[in-house]
Amino acid sequence: MDVEPVRVRFAPSPTGRMHLGSARTALYPYLLARRTGGTFILRIEDTDQKRFVPGAEKELVEGLRWLGLNYDEGADIGGPYGPYRQSERREIYHQHAWELVEKGHAFPCFCTSDRLEKIRQEQLKRKENPRYDGTCRKLDPDETRHRAAAGEKYVVRFKMAKEGYTTALDLLRGAITTENQALDDSVLLKSDGLPTYHLAAMVDDHLMKITHVIRGSEWLSTFPLHVNIIRAFGWQEPVWVHLSVFLKPTGKGKMSKREVAEAIKDGHSIFITDLRDLGYIPEGVLNWIVLMGWGVSEEDVMTLDEMIARFDINNLTPSPAAINFAKLDHFNGTHIRALRSEDLAARIKPYFLQAGYRVEDVKLLKIVPLIRERLVTLDDCLPFAAWFFKETVEPNPAELVAKNLTASQSADIARKTYEILSALPEITPELAEPPMRALVEQLGLSANQVFGILRVAVTGQSVSPPLFESMEIVGKKKVLERVKRAIEMLEKM
């Protein structure tokens, strides 16, 4: 386990929504930083202006804060190595691109997009992998400097070695060796003056003193290029960690847009703000995500503090992880049940308010222990407990009729129930349950039949929290009004 404080970063592009993969790519470096007393940085990699999505950066920041992954340096809070938004670092990349040109590791390329496309089509016809043909690589360095200074449009390409091998070391996968002739002269600086990821990320990681680069496996294909760029500058390499791939629930391939839409219909999503809006809590989501790629038991229930205490980067695994929404539900429900009553009350209150109910905090605090065990997501509070905040309930008359009994027989039971409850000084479980159970015995019926009529009468629904505890919260006056109303409904059937 690393004992030196690390400097790690989460460096998303604001080109789409924050999903499970993004969250995990943020979570592991966060855990490593907190475990070692290091620094966790948020860097916004927004140089791909064509794919920029308005609002995406805001959603990323919201997602991190909701999850509790608070960063120490970032675009909105500053830090000693800013700016932390790549579009504000243009001059830095320009200088470093030309530094590589001066060192003979890069060259300006003046080829037009039409020429490059023509070469690409010819290579495809010959069934070759499309790559740059090296035309400008052969130009005299003085000539290229003169043409660039004169304002001719150009990009800067990396001058990849054409012989030998590149061996790059990944912490999870070991040494990865690639033939240099299989690598391309990739663009480092685009014609608009903005860098590609390949240059910008390597420069920023060096200047921001990043010790560990923890990122998605999609960067494995360009890993040799990135290692070559760092070596061309003569910089020390960070520890490289390419995380495992997320697979769809079947375990075959990544989730498609259609499958994401289907998951939403079932109350699930791969997007972090969706999960928040669907009633998941950050504790449950983090517990679920952290185990998809960490070589510990997939059943371990952990808080964020416990994850930090146990985290060891050497225990990460490259094995693909299937998205299992049933496990998300399990962890979310488990963490909901672990919340203090006051905390859970505060988290479910907005759902009642949004549904238009007036909520009394004292009453809500009494309700929480009755529904806690039934909640998988926070919004489950509505079907279980919204009726507590209604002045009246409207039962389905058919549900007032007990199983294997007639409406008349059910009305008779409701009348006997009314007599018992009205004779009590107040309705509490201790006072109400014994005489009601005695009634069940006296009638020779099941508790489900007798209590079922009372449940529907008082709550307006056939499924509810514990009945006698619920009636205590509702209060004697309202309980009797609702039972009386149920008798009237049954008598009319």
Image (spheres, rainbow, N blue to C red):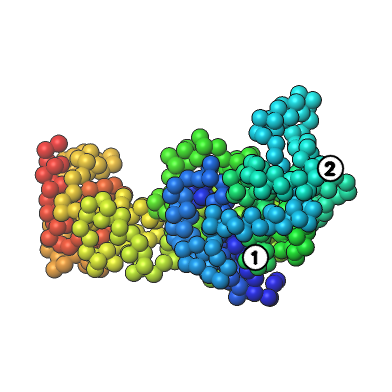
At horizontal 19% and vertical 53% (from top left) the residue drawn is 390
Give the image location of residue 14, x and y in percent. Answer: 51, 50
Q: Amino acid at mark 1?
A: Leu
Question: Taking 393 as reference, is 447 left or right?
Answer: right
- Labelled disc at residue 181: 2
Which SS class for mark 2? helix
Question: Taking 291 as reference, is 132 left or right?
Answer: right
| Residue 358 seen in this snapshot | yes
Q: Of residues 115 and 414, which is closer to you in this image?
A: 115
Separation (CA) of disc 1 from disc 2 = 30 Å
At horizontal 69% and vertical 54% (from top left) the residue drawn is 97
- Labelled disc at residue 13: none
- Labelled disc at residue 207: 1
Q: Residues within 10 Å of mark 2 (few under 14, many from 20)?
A: few
**Disc nearest the viewer among 1 and 2:** 1
Q: Amino acid at mark 2?
A: Gln
Give the image location of residue 103, x and y in percent. Answer: 78, 57
Quarter occupied by the N terminus: bottom right
